[in-house]
Image: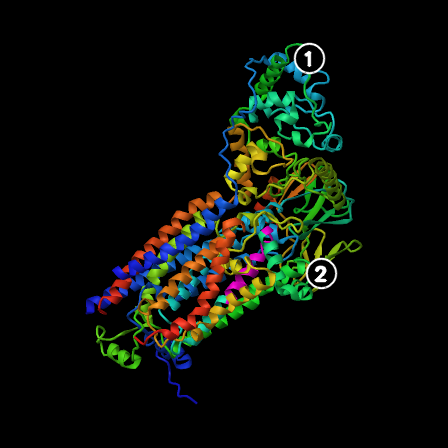
Amino acid sequence: MNKELKILAVVVFFSILTYVGVEPFAHSQMHKHVDDPTYAYADLKDSGKKGDAVKGKELVTGAGACTGCHSLKAESLPAPMDALTSASAYGVNPPDLSNSGALYDEKFLADLIKNPAHALGVEHKFKDGAMHPMVGFYGAGGDIDQEIADMVAYLKSIAPTAENLTPKDAFESACGRCHSMRYDKWSKIGTDPSFKSDKEMYEYKAKVATYDEALKAYMGAMPPDLSIIIRARSHHFLSTFIENPQSQLEGTSMPRVGLTKDGEVKVMEYLTQIGDSSKDKRESLGPWVILFFVIFSVIAYFWKQSMWKDLH
Amino acid sequence: MAVNENRRDFLGMALGGFTAVGGIISLGAMKASWDPLPSVKAAGFTTIDISGAKAGQLNVEKWRGKPIFVLKKTPDMKPHDRDIVIGKDRFHISIGLCTHLGCIPSYFPKKSEFICACHGGIFDVNGEVVKAPPPSPLVIPPFRLDGSKLVLGEEGDEYKKLKAAGLVA
Amino acid sequence: MANFEKAKSLGDWMNQRLGLDTVMRVMAYEYWIPKNINFLWAMGMILAMMFGVMLVSGIFLLMYYKPDAALAFDSVNYTIMTEVGYGWLWRHVHGVAASVVFLVIYIHMFTGIYYGSYKKGREMIWITGMLLFVTFSAEAFSGYMLPWGQMSYWAGMVITNLFSFGSLELNGVVEWIRGDYVPGDAFILRFFMLHVLLLPLAIMALIGLHFGALRIPHVNNQDGEEIDFDEAAKLYKEGKKKESKVIPFHPVFLSKDVFVMGVFLIFFFYLVFYHYGFALDPVNFDPADGLKTPAHIYPEWYFLWSYEILRPFSKDIGLIAFGFAQVAFFLLPFLDKSPNAVPASRRGLFNIWFWVMLVDMIVLSVMGKLPPEGAWNVIGLLSALTFIGLWIALPIITKLEKKV
């Protein structure tokens, strides 16, 4: 018996050595090290101003302001243009602002309003006089930082609480205009309807394709479908990439998303729901199957002992 | 020695039995893998609008891959217990598969009969058997009335009444 | 014609016609295995069981898989993984089993090498075993194509390109294998056929042959002792179990195998439920894209050592070295010139050869996965040369070996 344990130790040792070499070690050499996300957005300054939501509402919904391009469903303000027209004008459909106060970091929102390309971390794309499609806020005549603080305060005041924001909403607001989610029938311009005829289907698909074309031209490459990205990338990769895309893929045209930690958790929850839908079943079945084989092995051990005891 | 033999048998059989229990439980997983997929089940509900139907003309819709006969009755066709009444209109609605062996009977408007080409079974406009071999009338699918629309696959009040009266099949 | 009597029971009825008692006696109750063995002797039955596990899980995957370049990816990752009841379980079991089975194969192989179980009449056991290794490799590779992810596509691209045979540039052969200029519909369908029909048939035939090859030379034991099986069997049947050097396959040998299987299955299902990433590579969850190679491509872990023998050399030499690595193990019984069929620990230089070979193959595997840069390249080259050197040295050091 003692000898068998020694042999087992040798087998286990070389198996683990191989595993550690080809898995954790090789992967640590293959991928560059990126620190866990902090969601601090330390490169962005905090103006320290306290915002007034009432004043902010006038600024956000006033003539020629945010709602000139963005919809605001929370206030029943529709988008001035549909997704397709927007995409042909800007390259991408501007997001509805209802959830933004709940999803995005305050400092990030403030900087985004003032200087979109900077906040989004895509200044490398807009050199040589090219303009980011979202126009920065020039101020309404007063203290610009105060005005921006008011706007952020307003956006936060209309945003749903964490309990009321579903993971799906979080995904649609933060990711869904550039990324499809075909395992949940999400096509960037909306959820795919069921079609009564081929004509309806082709018309809808043509719309999606038109939108995709504009988006591809704007981004330089088609942003990937995220249906099972949760299994294609590690959690660490996704969270650091979302916090700062440049940290993982230098030069990528994916903008910084600016999510708070809670916002990121919501998005990840949705990605898991769709991309790893068997997770709960897997985790609840696992212990039972393993328990079965533990009991199996115990009975088998005693059987073996009884069979072998007359032999020596 | 005899004691040992018994003990050996007991442990060997216990292991065999325990393995068999595991095998039987795993049959449950195997059975689940053969079940119709959720997307197939979700597609088991079809809404059809029958307001535009013309009296005396058979419309064939599709539900769960099967043909559904929708016949708006003309005034000279006698009312029947199996009729589905929407407003002033009376409809015959049934799964268009012969209850004999599942062929699709053809409708002959002049005779007001469904005739099955496979074995010569004949049904009247109420789906009742006129001539064998079909053993029973054409089956009325589960439905729910939603205004002038018919949701197939759901059991609405009208369907439940027919079913309670034993008229659906 | 045989004489049939009125049967006393259903068992008796069957026995008169099928000779079940004889079958069981020859195959199990009086199939003699040496007593002096350890748990490494259970690896063969574990492999047979794992083949069964893959067959069963594969049947359920086969019911929903669609071998079509446009549909394959979603049929696996959507239909099987999210829609089919327990589809995720079959896929995890199938994928993890395919990876773990190679761990057991390697343990089985190195057990054979260590104890000299390919010598003195056991050559055919070794050769059929190596044929099984090759068919399992082909089975693993063809199965790897089927989910049609990025790793499937690019592995298909790279491996089929090997068949242009370097400077011979036999691109026609490559296209013939693929049925297309690049891996596509034709490719996926023919590899599907290989994976679910031709190769499993070959494997089943070879398993039969492998077991059959054991029959005459008998199973080896852990001291390389030559046993008179008839004599030992006679002692056992007389009830002198302590004195006899053999045990029957069933139930005595099997009782130990079953216990080892149980422990192995605990480990296996732990991997299936909690630690499957090594076998279901994340990169393969990106759909195949013929216009974008992943940043790092590498074969599954069990092919890494032979991949690394290919990599550090120039194209033609690499291919020759790679070809050499594939056949070297087949030749083991003939390159080993020693008269001794005993454990390596008692064979002097061969003992060193064995452990250096084992470590070298692990180093090759690790280097095969690391990006080919700087020091890794040098270590990779050295270990590839060591591998070749070891095979050249084998006939010499075994020739020098004295009879023990």
Counting other residues with Cα less than 10 Å from the Cα at mark 2, is it few (<14), some (14-19), or many (20 or more)? many
Chief secondary structure of the magenta portion: helix
Q: Is the N terminus of chain B in the top left, top right, bottom left or bottom right quadrant?
A: bottom left
> Residue pushed farthest bottom?
C1
| Separation of residues labelled 2 and 1 (CA atoms) | 80 Å
Residue found 39% across the figure and 49% down from its top = A288
Instruction: From the top left corner, tell me how far across and down residue B138 is, in percent.
Output: 66, 54
The relative height of residue B25 versus residue A218 in the rendered view (above or below) is below
Q: Which residue is mark 2?
A: B116
Instruction: From the top left corner, tell me how far across and down residue C85 is, in percent.
Output: 51, 50
Q: Secondary structure at mark 2?
A: loop
The amino acid at mark 1 is Ala
| Residue C249 placement: quadrant | bottom left
Q: Chain of mark 2?
A: B
Asked whether residue B28 is in view, the answer is yes
Q: Of tags 2 and 1, which is closer to the observer?
A: 1
Asked whether residue C90 is in view, the answer is no
Instruction: From the top left corner, tell me how far across and down residue C245 is, in percent.
Output: 26, 74
Q: Chain of mark 1?
A: A
First to last magenta residue range: C134-150
Locate residue C202 relative to residue C35 in the image: left or right.
Answer: right
The relative height of residue C267 versus residue A90 in the rendered view (above or below) is below
The amino acid at mark 2 is Cys
The relative height of residue B96 versus residue C322 in the rendered view (above or below) is above
Q: Which residue is mark 1?
A: A140
Most foreground residue, C185 or C183: C183
